[in-house]
């Protein structure tokens, strides 16, 4: 059948449109059309190709997941060997210096020669891949293998949307692009959430996810574990004039439609390398993908040629590692902890291990399902992860090293602290001790929360002290705290008269608070800091809040049926009414304010960009962010000309300076309250 030229034109126009949209979506991270419109164009092209198979081309976006499952991967001999790079293991920022010293020596530069220019990149934690483009068309993708011979994984790499099937613009005869295939953290979390929901095994980390996806023989399964790609170098090249620097090379690759990571910078001398290392270390946890360090490369390609190679590593590049976020250690015991609301959390006690910059001895196992799914047992060797300030967790077990006599962990039926029953409502992941404030663990946690900095902020009422007060039964509810006097307190362990006096003074100060802090301090389920503030703002007085019915509660922004039910359950409980009455009788008070009704879902800050910096006193960073976002604002980490407001708390530093330089409006915390409509 002859295909009319109108149909041919339509097919090529659709291909072009879809490829352009994909490029904007996956490479530039700036979608140009709604997903539904993309799907519509995609289906139209699929229908045309189904009716006229002769229209199919290798670069058609419908052909990303094609092909049949393979029996195995074919070997690919690399035309230019895929080398690795030397690793600088000194994880202090100053570790960068040795590379600069070595490069200067190898280039024969003396002390007063100018600084060497470098291009700094991230060290992505995925798998090295060679993409071969012939006349612009992706013809082959291969793994690194032993550096000489890799495996043909073209089918799987084609499923990566960020990898162009055809290069943009005039194309060289041959261009081999080297880079890293990786799984982004959001894709990793989504994949694991889906697997968990289906009761299927989860991935230990994104790197294993990427390796598994690439080693998948069936491309349809590979496509279900979505990967991304960053280009960082070249293999064989024919018919293309190389730029003069690595920086220009990366720009050229980006111009050809390849994804190149934004976080890259030209550095002059060791000082700049150190600054780059420090800057990226600070951003590490906020990046949407895992990195294990940074890479420094001599920028001028001439100088790279001059430096050449030492056996399998170039002399012009080095990887500078960050401290590891994952390490192996042994589980010495599994215990359960009882939280403020009675939630039972299994915790692994670990042989101490240095990971993510601290020594870790405990890691959460989240809940019973999680322990069962990961099948973590006493005696197991496990992978522990600690990233940023997130609590350490066990991400997987090394089954090969499991001792023969090990037994699966069984959740206790009774609370290890008070002996009450542990219940687990159907459909809920969390098991709870039903002991309430009878349970000393819950009482202790409730008191710690009550005294914490963002609640009543009782200075000096630390963990050890709370422990003793609960053990001796001196304090059964937060209200009892205000009955303590110096003579009694001074009798406690590690307390002198002076500390006792200080604590009594701190209690006196804490009596004067705000309604928002008071509500937060009560530890009502579902009522975090932001909700407490919203309630206080909306009702103005505690009595107005106590008198509110479901309907009135739900007029408060962010209060839905769940929060409203939790509030009513709490306030209806006679014990809680008693505690509130006793706290007020003990002199806990706050200024009453005129209620400010912020109607739900008002986007008063839509389109505004706000940067928070320094220490905020009234609201935590998280709560302020939540409140701003609820009003439609974008909360950003860096100040630019596009920033509308910078909120500067105590000890604000460089961001405040930059805001002043750029003439951006600077607010203090009172200004923030006004901005939120709460002031
Ligand atoms: S350049 C000749 N740049 O780290 C230089 N490698 O041993 C070749 N990697 O297996 C490598 N991020 O997979 C380079 N920005 C980056 C990288 C990077 C990650 C990986 C690569 C290789 C290993 C280096």
Image (cartoon, grey):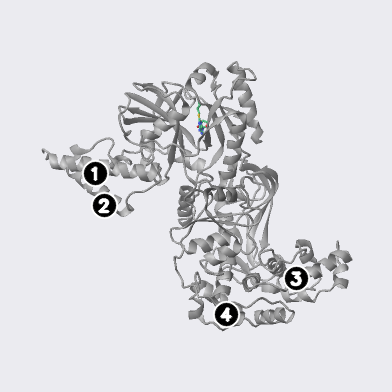
Disc number lying in front (1 or 4) = 4
Q: Where residue 152 appears, x then y in whole percent? A: 39, 30
Tell which of 603 and 468 is nearer to you.
603
Upstream in sequence: badge 1 or badge 3? 1
Which residue was labeled with disc 4? 545
Identify the image quadrant of the C terminus.
bottom right
Q: Circle 1 sits on which residue?
A: 14
Query: What separation in Å lies between label 1 and label 2 (alpha carbons)?
Result: 10 Å
Pointer 3 residue: 509
Q: Nearer the viewer, mark 2 or mark 3?
A: 3
**Which residue carries the number 2 mark?**
40
Tell me: is circle 4 under 8 Å from ligand 1: no
For mark 1, give the secondary structure.
helix
Residue at image location 49% in from the left, 71% down from the top? 557
Residue that appears at 84% across and 68% down:
501
- Distance in Å between CA atoms under marks 1 and 4: 58 Å
Q: Is residue 218 above or below residue 475?
A: above
Q: Label 4: few (<14), some or many (≥20) within 10 Å?
A: some
Q: Earlier in the sequence, mark 3 or mark 4?
A: 3
Q: Is mark 2 within 8 Å of ligand 1?
A: no
Q: CA distance from mark 2 to mark 3?
A: 64 Å
Considering only order in the chain, which callout, 2 or 1, is on the residue closer to the N terminus? Answer: 1
Mark 3 CB in 8 Å range of ligand 1? Answer: no
């Amino acid at each position: 059948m002859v295909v009319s030229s109108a149909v041919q034109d339509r097919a090529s126009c659709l291909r072009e449109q879809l490829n352009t949209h994909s490029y904007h979506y996956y490479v530039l991270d700036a979608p140009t059309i709604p997903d539904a419109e993309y799907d519509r164009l995609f289906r139209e092209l699929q229908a045309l190709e189904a009716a006229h198979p002769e229209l199919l081309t290798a670069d058609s976006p419908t052909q990303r997941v094609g092909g049949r499952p393979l029996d195995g991967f074919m070997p690919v001999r690399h035309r230019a060997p895929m080398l690795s790079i030397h690793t600088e293991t000194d994880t202090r920022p100053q570790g960068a210096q040795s590379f600069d010293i070595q490069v200067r020596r190898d280039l024969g530069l003396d002390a007063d020669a100018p600084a060497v220019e470098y291009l700094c990149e991230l060290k992505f934690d995925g798998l090295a891949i060679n993409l071969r483009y012939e006349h612009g068309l992706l013809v082959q993708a291969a793994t690194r293998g032993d550096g000489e011979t890799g495996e043909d994984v073209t089918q799987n790499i084609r499923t990566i949307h960020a990898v162009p099937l055809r290069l943009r613009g005039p194309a060289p005869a041959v261009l081999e692009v080297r880079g890293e295939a990786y799984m982004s953290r959001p894709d990793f979390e989504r994949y694991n959430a889906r697997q968990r929901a289906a009761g299927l095994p989860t991935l230990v980390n994104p790197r294993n996810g990427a390796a598994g996806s690439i080693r998948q023989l069936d491309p349809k399964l590979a496509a279900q574990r979505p990967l991304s790609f960053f280009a960082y170098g070249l293999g064989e090249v024919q018919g293309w004039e190389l730029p003069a620097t690595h920086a220009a090379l990366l720009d050229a690759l980006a111009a050809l439609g390849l994804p190149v990571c934004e976080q890259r910078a030209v550095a002059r001398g060791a000082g700049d390398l150190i600054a780059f290392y420090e800057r990226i270390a600070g951003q590490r946890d906020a990046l949407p993908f895992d990195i294990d360090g940074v890479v420094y490369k001599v920028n001028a390609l001439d100088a790279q040629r001059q430096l050449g190679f030492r056996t399998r590593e170039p002399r012009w590049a080095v990887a500078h590692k960050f401290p590891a976020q994952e390490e192996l250690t042994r589980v010495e015991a599994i215990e359960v902890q009882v939280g403020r609301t009675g939630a039972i959390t299994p915790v692994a006690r670990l042989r101490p291990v240095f990971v993510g910059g601290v020594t870790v001895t405990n890691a959460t196992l989240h809940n019973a399902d999680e322990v069962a799914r990961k099948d973590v047992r006493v005696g197991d060797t496990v992978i522990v992860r600690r990233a940023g300030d997130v609590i350490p967790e066990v991400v997987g077990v090394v089954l090969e090293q499991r001792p023969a006599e090990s037994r699966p962990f069984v959740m206790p039926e009774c609370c290890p602290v008070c002996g009450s029953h542990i219940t687990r409502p159907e459909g809920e992941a969390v098991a709870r001790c039903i002991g309430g404030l009878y349970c000393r663990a819950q009482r202790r946690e409730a008191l710690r929360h009550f005294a914490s900095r963002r609640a009543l902020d009782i200075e000096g009422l630390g963990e050890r002290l709370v422990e003793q007060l609960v053990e001796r039964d001196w304090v059964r509810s937060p209200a009892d705290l205000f009955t303590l006097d110096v003579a009694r307190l001074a009798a406690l362990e590690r307390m002198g008269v002076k500390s006792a006096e200080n604590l009594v003074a701190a209690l006196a100060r804490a009596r004067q608070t705000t309604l928002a802090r008071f509500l937060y301090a009560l530890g009502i389920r579902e009522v975090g800091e932001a909700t407490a503030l919203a309630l206080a703002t909306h009702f103005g007085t505690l009595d107005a809040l106590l008198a509110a019915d479901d309907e009135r509660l739900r007029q408060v922004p962010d209060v839905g049926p769940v929060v409203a039910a939790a509030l009513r359950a709490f306030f209806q409980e006679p014990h809680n009414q008693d505690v509130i009455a006793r706290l007020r009788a003990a002199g806990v008070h706050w200024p009453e304010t005129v209620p400010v009704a912020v109607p739900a879902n008002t986007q008063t800050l839509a389109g505004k960009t706000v940067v928070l910096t320094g220490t905020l006193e009234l609201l935590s960073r998280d709560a302020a962010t939540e409140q701003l976002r609820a009003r439609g604002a974008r909360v950003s980490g860096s100040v630019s000309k596009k920033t509308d407001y910078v909120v500067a708390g105590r000890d604000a530093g460089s961001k405040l300076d930059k805001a002043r330089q750029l003439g951006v409006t600077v607010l203090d915390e009172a200004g923030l309250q006004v901005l939120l409509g709460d002031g």
